[in-house]
Image (cartoon, rainbow, N blue to C red):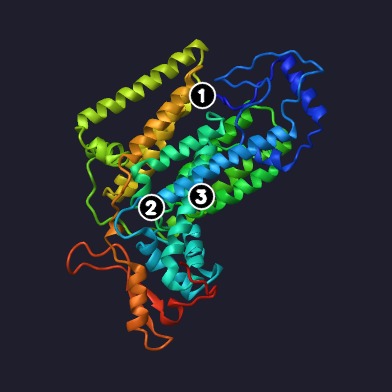
Amino acid sequence: MPDSGEPILTGSASTAASTAATSAGVARGGVADRLEVFFDDGRRAAVGTEARPATPVAARATDPVPRHRGARAARLLAALVLLGGAWAAASAAMLVRPAGIPPWRSVWAEDGTRFLPGAIRSPGPGTWWDPFGGYRHLLPRLIGDLAARFPLVDASVVLAVASSVVAGAALVLFAVGLRRWLPAAWMQAGVVLAVAAAHAMAGEIAANAANLHWYLTLGLVGLALLRPRHLTTALAAAAVAAAFALSDPFSPLVAALALADAAWWTATRRRTVRTAAATWMVPLTLTAGAVAQVATMVADPRTPSPFAARPYGDLPALYLDRVLRDGLSPVPLARFSDDTLLLVTAAAAVVLLGLAVAAAGARHRLGSHTVIGVLLVAASPAAFAGPVLVNHTVADRYAAAPVALLVAGLLVLAAGMPRVGPVVFLAACAGLVALGLASFATHPVRGAGPDYVAAARHAAATECRTPGQVVRVPVAPIAAQPGAPRWFTELPCDRITTGPLDLRLP
C-alpha cells in the first residue's frame, strides 16, 4: 500500500534539509532521534506526504535551522504529554466507568482461579509460561505474580490497576502504529480517546487480566504497522511485541499482517542492512511468539464450545446490536431500529469513502488513507464474526476489537480528506468521544459482586484459625442461577493481610 508517512524531499528542499541538519550538528543516534519513531508529529521543513505534498523552497544560508535540537525536543515533549495524557485517560476510564462493585474491589474469573493462585503457589517465572484454555498468558500471569507479592486483600487493586495500565498502553501503540496516516501526535491521541470512549472498551473486558488479550490484539496491530528507523527502537518494540504475542491467541493473524507489510516495504524501498534489520525485527519477533501460540494450541487445545453452532444469518443482526449499538453507545442509539442504525452507519461510511476516493482520483491513484481506512472498517465485522462462529455464542467482549477497528478506520478516512482532513478528523473524533461518553456508565457482570475486599477481610477475621489454613473467597461472576457453579479463589490465611512486599494499599 502507498506510504503517506514516508518523507518526500523535493529538489532544493532536499539540499536545504541536508544543509540544515549538517549545520545543526545533530548527532544521529541521540535519544530524541530514537524516540522520533514513536512521537513524530510530521512537522518537518520542506517535507511532504501523499496527503500534503512538499513545497519546494530555496536553500539560503540565512534560513533558520528547521530541526535543531531544541525544536525537536519540544516537539517530542509535547507528543509525550499528549499521548501520556491519552494513556492515563484511557486507563482511568476502564476503572471508573463500570457500575456496581468497583473493579478495584472485585476479582474477575480466571484472575482469581488461575493467575493469582498460581502465583501464590509458585511465585516467579515457574508458572509464567503455563498454558490455559489453549494458549499462553504471559502478561496476565505476570500481573497475577505482581498481585501475589502484596497482601492478598489488596490483590483486586493490583489486578485492576495493572491490567488497565497495560490495556491503555496497548491502545496507545495501536494509535501510534497508524502514524503513517495520522502523523500528528494529537491525531494519535485523538484515536486513543475515541476508542477508549466506546462503551465496549470499558465493559466486561476492562480492568482484568483475563480479558487483556482483546486490548493486546490492537496493540499488536499497531506494532505490526510500526516501522522503527533504528535498531534500538526496533529492539524495544520487538520486546513488547514478544510479550503481547505470548499473551494473545490472535497473534498468528496479526503476524501475517506484520510480515506482509514488512515485505511490501522492503520490496518498494531501497534499504540498508541496518534499516532492513530494524524493519524486520518486530515482524519476526511477533511471528516467533505467534508460532509458540500455535504450538500450544495444537499440543494443548481448548475445550470445545458447549453451544450449538449459530447460523450465519444471525451475524448481521448481532453485529448491529452488539457492536454498533451496545459497543459504541447504547443509551442514545437504543432509540434507533436496526434498519435505521444500519442505514445511518452505512451512509456515513459511504460519504467518507466517497470523499476519500474523490480525493484519490484527483491524484490519479488510490490514496493510502483510503486503503487503510477501508481495510480497518472491513476488518471490524470480520473480527466480530470470528469469535462468534468459533465459540458458537456471543458476548459483550467480542465487540471490543471490532469497535476499535471501526472507529480507527473512520478516523483514518476522515484524516485523508485533502486540505480539510485535520478539521474533519477533529470533528469526527469529537463526535465519537461525545457519543461514547453519552453512555458513560457500563454495567458488566462483575459489577453485581461479590465484593472481594470485604469477603477477604471477613474470611481473615472469622475463618482463619491457624496461619497455614486456606480459605475460599468468592470472586465474580456470581452464579446466574441457584445451584449453578460459583467462582472461588483460595487464599492462605497468613498471606491475606501480609505479603512479601508487606505494603497495604489504601
Give the secondary structure at mark 2: helix
Residue type at the position of mark 1: Ser
Which residue appears farthest toward the bottom when viewing the image? 466
Q: Residues within 10 Å of mark 2 (few under 14, many from 20)?
A: some
Question: Residue 364 at x, y = what percent?
Answer: 51, 11
Would you identify the image quadrant in which residue 55 lies? top right
- In the rendered structure, find residue 368 and report the number of the disc placed on it: 1
Task: Give the alpha-carbon distance from disc 2 to disc 1, as whole Å.
Answer: 37 Å
Task: Give the alpha-carbon distance from disc 2 to disc 3, as whole Å.
Answer: 33 Å
Give the mark toward the camera: 2 or 1. 2
Would you identify the image quadrant in which residue 124 lies? bottom right
The residue lying toward the viewer, choosing from 466 and 277, is 466
- In the rendered structure, find residue 290 and report the number of the disc placed on it: 3
Which residue appears farthest toward the left when viewing the image? 482
Residue type at the position of mark 3: Ala
Q: Is residue 479 above or below residue 251?
A: below
- State which tag comes first along the sequence, 2 or 3: 2
- State which tag comes first along the sequence, 3 or 1: 3
Residue picked out by circle 2:
96
Question: Residue 493 at x, y = what percent?
Answer: 41, 81
In the visual, does 39 lie left or right of 490? right
Residue 324 seen anywhere in this rendered image of the structure: yes
Give the secondary structure at mark 3: helix
Question: Residue 234 at x, y = what percent?
Answer: 64, 44
In the visual, does 75 lie left or right of 298? right
